[in-house]
Amino acid sequence: MNGIGDAVVRIGPVLAIAIGVLALVAVLVNRRSGLATDTLVATLRAVVQLAALAGVLAVVIPHLWASALFVVVMAVAAAWTSARRIRPKQSDFVTVARCLGPVAAPTIVIVLVLVVVGVLPARGIAVIPTAGILLGGAMVTTSLAGRRAHDELTTRHGEVEAALSLGLLPRDARFEICAPASATALIPGLDQTRAVGLVTIPGAFVGMVLGGASVWAAAAMQLFVLIALLAVSSIAMLVTVELVAREDL
């Protein structure tokens, strides 16, 4: 195989072997943390899901309505993933539906606005990747913020009770305790934005340059992606903390 793919990595049997060895290393290293099985399952799912994604995108990208439907499917999957992380033993339909708020709502609103104002072309090839990137960022932030909020409320339960004894409403007492800790969910996104061009060269930038775009166009696109991710993640974090403070998540 020649072209853009081979410009990044050489596609062939050696690549398959390298992927297998790297996956094995991750599994073996994660045995100590008890995440070996999760690592193996994640690897196998990535193989199957990426193969399925390639086939599905070939069908849905030419049709805007099909692309929109695919984005909805991605949003539900992202909300389900966050629900499982936040409430491992209670990831029922209600929890998943509530996770759609911080995970999916910011992304869908921002993508729709960008399409309406003309920044984002109303085509599947533009909408699906953009929505996927933003959904992924919101999903990670929601999961981290939700877990940190619940952990903080558990370990600092006495402080919540003290705040209630002083007359604070339950929502306000819980919010004051869990909000600062949950804000750490934004650190990965902030560090990624700070380090871009110095430590990391993101995939969107590389892909556009390899596809023939100018380096300036690629830089503008990457800046858009990073700032949009920050916006989506910030909203996701705030909504997640609010839901946890209200005991709705």
Image (cartoon, rainbow, N blue to C red):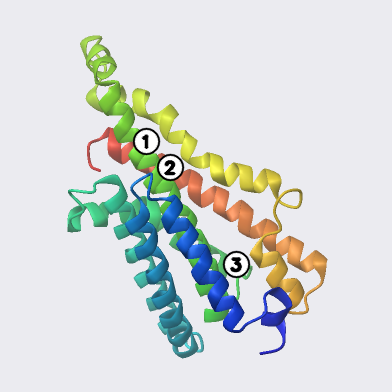
Label ID, residue 178: none
Provide the secondary structure element on which disc 1 rests.
Answer: helix
**Callout 3 amino acid:** Val
Q: Residue at x 37, y 77 (%)?
A: 69
Identify the image quadrant of residue 156: top left
Identify the image quadrant of residue 86: top left
**Height in image: 80 above or below 162?**
below
Q: Alpha-carbon neighbours of circle 1 within 10 Å: few (<14), some, or many (≥20)?
A: many
Q: Nearer the viewer, residue 41 or 194?
A: 41
Provide the secondary structure element on which disc 3 rests.
Answer: helix
Residue identifier under label 2: 237
Label ID, residue 148: 1
**Height in image: 105 above or below 184?**
below
Residue identifier under label 3: 117
- Residue 122 showing in the rendered view: no
Q: Position of residue 9 (x, y in %)?
A: 67, 75
- Residue 80 showing in the rendered view: yes
**Callout 1 amino acid:** Arg
Quick one: quadrant of the N terminus? bottom right
The mark nearer the N terminus, 2 or 3, is: 3
The mark nearer the N terminus, 1 or 2, is: 1
Of discs 1 and 2, which sits in the foreground?
Answer: 1
Q: Residue at x 52, y 80 (%)?
A: 124
Q: Alpha-carbon neighbours of circle 2 within 10 Å: few (<14), some, or many (≥20)?
A: many
Q: Position of residue 56 (x, y in %)?
A: 43, 85
